[in-house]
DNA sequence: TATAGTGCTTCCAGTCACTGGAAGGTCAAG
DNA sequence: CTTGACCTTCCAGTGACTGGAAGCACTATA
């Protein structure tokens, strides 16, 4: 398979796949013409990566996950630990965003939003409290 | 005021303040010795920026907000529009994160997390569905 | 007056995970 | 033989800082 087809099937841009090769996440063969030649296994790996990235794992986490995936002697506890840690980070981010949202929503609500200059949002940003 | 003091009072790292000068968000005077000399107004601006950044506004949004803040002829509708747009983006992000969280939480829950290799998390990442 | 320590300066490079674009080689169809 | 799609490499840029090196400025103490 050439990169275009594998990109389509894995749901990743070709650029991203080249980048993943650069950083050693996949190592496709090369055809005589210099084109990358992807196996079904390469495709499988890339789809795995696409899903892990979609769940917000960092590239380094993905590398680790891929390593665990390919390690027949892995312990599922290691995978679970990594995933649980990541879940915690997602929760933290959600909490942060919720706080931002609450604060900003209050300000937006207080702003009449008309042609006059006085604005609780700007006041909220400028306040010394 | 020197940068250290203003950093302390605005709650921003000195590095960040230098960066903000670089990109034209503040323009402190200079003392004879070459040190930046911040006025109370500079400090005020920086505190404004710190709060806007803490609410997740991009630097470009901050630039716009600062412009509106200093424009006596502004219309609060413009501020409200910007803030509302940003609120929407926060909501989108929260929704995304919640979806990630739900998917990953299910997988984590299904994983016994012991010394054995079989792992629903990896299976979930590898599946062709 | 020498010196030690802190704070300031600039500049360069790195972060993360791509993304865009230029310049050019390869291949299949007409 | 040309067109156009697809592939290659390499370099630079994104956002918002952050770290670190090299060196100047200031203050306090011996």
Image: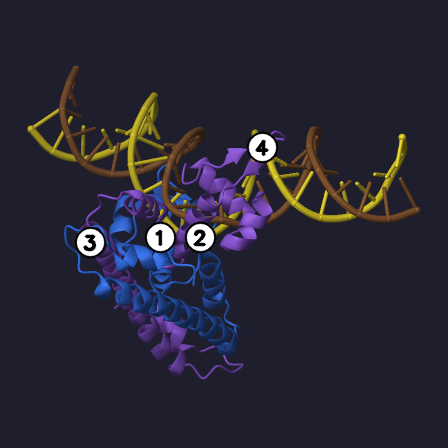
Chain colours: A blue, B purple, C yellow, D brown
Name the residue at 23% across, 52% down: B79
Disc 4: CA contacts within 10 A as few (<14), some (14-19) or many (>=20) = few
Residue at the disc numbered 3: B81
Dot 2 lies on which element? helix
Q: Front-most of A40 and A10?
A: A10
In the shown orientation, is residue A15 left or right of residue C15?
left
Residue at the disc numbered 4: B31
Q: Are marks 1 and 2 on the same chain?
A: no
Disc 2: CA contacts within 10 A as few (<14), some (14-19) or many (>=20) = many
Q: Which mark is residue B47?
A: 2
* Cβ–Cβ under 8 Å for marks 2 and 3: no
Chain containing the residue with disc 3:
B
Q: Front-most of B1 and A94?
A: B1
Q: Which mark is residue A39?
A: 1
Sequence-earlier tag: 4 or 3: 4
Chain containing the residue with disc 1:
A
In which quarter of the view is residue C25 placed?
top left
Of labels 2 and 3, the one closer to you? 2
Dot 1 lies on which element? loop
């Amino acid at each position: 398979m050439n990169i275009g087809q594998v990109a389509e099937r894995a749901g990743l841009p070709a650029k991203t796949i080249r980048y993943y090769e650069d950083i050693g996440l996949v190592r496709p063969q090369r055809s005589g013409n210099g084109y990358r030649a992807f196996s079904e296994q390469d495709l499988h790996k890339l789809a795995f990566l696409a899903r892990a990235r979609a769940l917000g794992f960092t590239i380094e986490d993905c590398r680790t996950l891929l390593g665990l995936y390919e390690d027949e002697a892995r312990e599922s506890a290691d995978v679970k630990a990594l995933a649980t840690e990541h879940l915690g980070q997602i929760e933290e981010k959600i909490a942060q965003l919720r706080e931002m949202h609450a604060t900003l929503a209050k300000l937006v609500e207080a702003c009449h939003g008309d042609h006059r200059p006085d604005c609780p949002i700007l006041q909220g940003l400028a306040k010394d409290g």
